Amino acid sequence: MLPGPTIIKKCSECSGSIEEHTIASGNTFGATFWTDGKRDAPMLPDQPWLVICPHCQALIWIDEQAELGEVEPFSDSEIYKSAKSYGVPELQDYFSALKISNLSKNKERYLRLRAWWSGNDKRRGSGIKQNLSDDEKENLQALDKMLDTLDDNDRLMKAEIKRELSQFEEAEAILRESFDSEFSQVVSIISELVQRRESFVAEINYEN
Ligand SMILES: [Zn+2]
């Protein structure tokens, strides 16, 4: 992974300086893919949209914060000494952000997707197999309604949402429809989980 410049942003709530690290180039080598669409890629770090200000803990959209300047990677410049890296929101943060009125569709979809992933984090791999909370179920039902039934990727997400909500027949009905060939491996992995009536997020092991 090759880091790009660090962009220094100013928090709109407290005017504190925040570091936004960028990536010049990365790849998905050694990445783990999950049925809920999350990707954990060590060589391609996540660049979240909603972040937590490291100074005042406000939930802020990183692209809406004013830019103060840029620092080259590996620079020992001390111009922005007080700048700190942002924090990453957790499940409850996404739920509180969803209570903001007049959210754009894009933001709402982002928050619902991130809330889904964040709730699932404890269930990944050898994690605990804890049933979805009522808030998580409500979130998935709302996300399901936002997805585009004409888009293969969205339809696959709908099937996975139905599976995680234990609505296995509905998941099967979606998975029986035709999908572009690039999705065939994921479709068969999720279909197998549906057949076994398994509702937890699972790792996708792509065959090379
Ligand atoms: Zn702040």
Image (spheres, grey):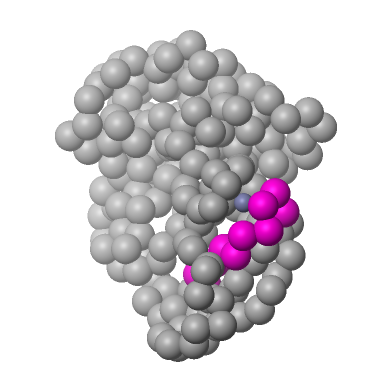
Residue 93 drawn at (x, y percent): 53, 33
Closer to the camera in the image, 149 or 2: 2
Does 181 sit above or below residue 129? below
Residue 172 drawn at (x, y percent): 45, 21
Q: Is residue 17 magenta?
A: yes
**Residue at 31% in and 44% down:** 204
Image side of residue 62 versus residue 47, left or right:
right
The quadrant in which residue 2 appears is bottom left
Residue 5 drawn at (x, y percent): 53, 81
Let me know if residue 152 appears in the view.
no
Closer to the camera in the image, 134 or 73: 73
**Residue at 82% in and 32% down:** 102
Q: Is residue 98 magenta?
A: no
Image side of residue 186 versus residue 178, left or right:
left
Does 45 sit above or below residue 24? above
Closer to the camera in the image, 58 or 196: 58
The quadrant in which residue 30 appears is bottom left
The residue most toward the right is 102
| Magenta stretch bounds | 12-22
Image side of residue 188 versus residue 196, left or right:
right
The quadrant of the image that shows the C terminus is: bottom left
